[in-house]
C-alpha cells in the first residue's frame, strides 16, 4: 500500500500577467520538500476547461480522473474584486463526487487582504461539496512586495515557509484520516 498523499494543486488565475505561476511554483517546491506527497499541478490556464459546464467535454473528461485520484487539494487563488476568479467556480462546478470527503487548503495572494476574502467564499463552496477546509493557509498580502528585483519569490521565505508547513501538516493529517475512513466505508452524501 502506498501511503504517499496525492496532492492536487489547483492554480486558479488565468489572466495575462498573473502572479499564479510564481506563487504556485513556490508552493509546489514547499510541498515536495515537505515529503510524503506527490504533487499534481492543475493550472486552469493550461487545462482548456470549457467556460460553461458540460460533463461530456473532452477537457473535463481528461481532468476528472486527476481530481478523483487526489487525496487532498490546495487552491492557489488571487483575489479579484473582493472575490475569486470565475474560472475557479467553473472548474469546481464541473465535478461533484470527485471532491467529496477530501481536505482542501489555500494559498492566496492579492492586495491588502492577501486574497483572504476569496478564501472565505471558497470555504463555503467547498463545504457544500462535502470537503474539509483546513484552518491554516498561506496568504501573501501586497504580493508585489514579495517579488525581488531579479524576480525571486518570495524575498523573505521564512514566515510563509512555516505557514506552508503548518498547512501541509493539517492537509496530510486530514487526507490520511479521510482516506482510511473511506477504505472502511464508502462516503455517502
Image (cartoon, rainbow, N blue to C red):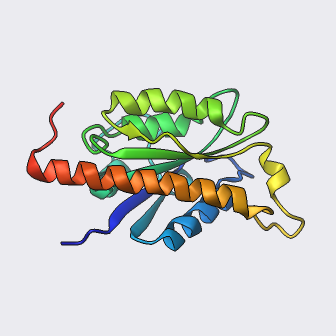
> Which residue occupies 58% across, 69% down?
29
Q: Quadrant of the N terminus?
A: bottom left
Quarter of the image for the C terminus: give it.
top left
- The x and y percentages for residue 101 are 27, 42
| Image coords of residue 90 (percent x, y) | 45, 36
Q: Is residue 115 above or below residue 102?
A: above
State which quadrant residue 156 falls in. Answer: bottom right
**Residue 44 to residue 100: above or below:** below
Q: Point out residue 146 in the picture as x, y percentages from the top left corner.
A: 80, 55
Judge left or right: residue 111 versus residue 183: right
Judge whether 120 appears above or below 3 on screen. above
> Looking at the image, which is closer to me, 10 or 177?
177
Residue for point 43% across, 45% down: 104
Q: Residue at x 54, y 45 (%)?
A: 106
Q: How many marks?
A: 0
Q: Residue at x 60, y 32 (%)?
A: 118
Question: Do we see residue 58 in this rendering?
Answer: no
Amino acid at each position: 500500500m502506498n501511503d504517499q498523499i496525492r496532492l492536487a494543486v489547483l492554480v486558479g488565475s488565468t489572466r495575462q500577467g498573473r502572479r499564479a505561476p510564481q506563487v504556485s511554483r513556490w508552493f509546489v517546491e514547499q510541498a515536495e520538500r515537505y515529503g510524503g506527497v506527490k504533487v499534481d499541478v492543475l493550472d486552469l490556464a493550461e487545462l482548456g476547461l470549457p467556460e460553461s459546464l458540460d460533463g461530456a467535454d473532452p477537457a473535463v473528461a481528461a481532468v476528472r480522473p486527476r481530481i478523483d485520484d487526489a487525496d487532498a487539494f490546495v487552491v492557489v487563488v488571487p483575489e479579484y474584486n473582493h472575490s475569486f476568479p470565475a474560472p475557479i467556480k467553473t472548474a469546481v462546478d464541473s465535478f461533484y463526487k470527485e471532491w467529496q470527503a477530501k481536505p482542501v487548503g489555500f494559498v492566496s495572494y492579492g492586495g491588502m487582504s492577501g486574497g483572504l476574502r476569496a478564501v472565505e467564499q471558497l470555504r463555503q463552496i467547498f463545504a457544500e461539496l462535502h470537503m474539509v477546509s483546513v484552518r491554516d493557509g498561506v496568504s501573501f498580502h501586497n504580493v508585489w512586495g514579495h517579488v525581488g528585483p531579479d524576480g525571486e519569490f518570495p524575498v523573505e521565505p521564512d514566515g510563509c515557509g512555516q505557514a506552508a508547513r503548518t498547512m501541509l501538516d493539517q492537509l496530510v493529517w486530514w487526507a490520511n484520516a479521510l482516506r482510511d475512513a473511506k477504505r472502511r466505508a464508502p462516503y455517502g452524501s
